[in-house]
Amino acid sequence: MPDPVLPRIARSDPRATQDLLDRYGSLLWSIARRHATDAADAEDAVQEILLDLWSKADRFDPTVGAEASFITMVARRKLIDRHRRRAARPQPQALDEALEVPAAESLATADKTEDVTRVLDVMRELPKERRRVLDLSLRVGLSHDEIATKLGLALGTVKSHARRGLMQIRDALARVGAAGTAAARKGGA
């Protein structure tokens, strides 16, 4: 039986990480893949499990149990935590479905309803990718990293879409506000 890898990781042995991956990588992948929604999700899960193993490597005691059992236990606990975090998140709703909901039902005041309607009108005119990035960011609450993973885009592209989309909304709302102010002046004069 080979020497356990986790005590070497706890001692910061630079070769121990590769040994851990060589010895237990397929085990971690198979456990993560069974609990993941897709390959990308499984890769993220394996990374989280590895980070957890590195932080808990000093807790492994070879006199108590086998290293593979300890690694499996840490992996399963991490996957359960991931599942609970997902279950606690609000379920995303497609932007098109959200646009169909009358704003008056969800907001109490007419001013807020008008503002939301303006924003939704402007968002409908955004390019599809920008609209999807903003929807996932603002409504669902995903981070830029999570959006990049979900949409299969580069992180910089996601950030650019978000920034440009928000600027486009801001500029459109400024134009609407300026037109409303001009109309009010004209009507009052």
Image: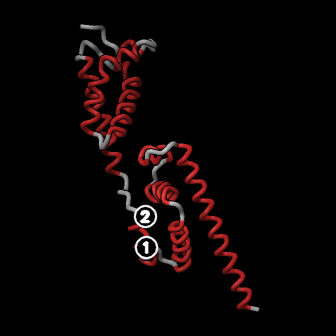
**Residue drawn 34% across and 51% down?**
88
Res 58 label: none
Residue type at the position of mark 1 = Ser
Image vertical order of residue 20 relative to residue 38, above or below: above
Neighbours of disc 2 within 10 Å: few (<14), some (14-19), many (20+):
some
Residue 149, given in percent of the width and then of the height, sits at: 43, 43
Residue 123, given in percent of the width and then of the height, sits at: 52, 66
The quadrant of the rendering that contains the N terminus is top left
Image vertical order of residue 92 relative to residue 108, above or below: above
Tag 2, which secondary structure? helix
59 relative position to 13: left or right? left
In this view of the protein, which residue sits in the foreground, 55 or 131? Answer: 131
Q: Earlier in the sequence, mark 1 or mark 2?
A: 2
Res 106 label: 1
The single residue placed furthest to the front in the displayed view is 127
Residue type at the position of mark 2 = Leu
Residue 77, given in percent of the width and then of the height, sits at: 29, 34
**Residue drawn 39% across and 31% down?**
47
117 relative position to 94: left or right? right
**Residue drawn 34% across and 14% down?**
5
Identify the residue under disc 2. Answer: 95
Q: Quadrant of residue 67?
A: top left
Image vertical order of residue 26 relative to residue 148, above or below: above
Residue 157, given in percent of the width and then of the height, sits at: 55, 47
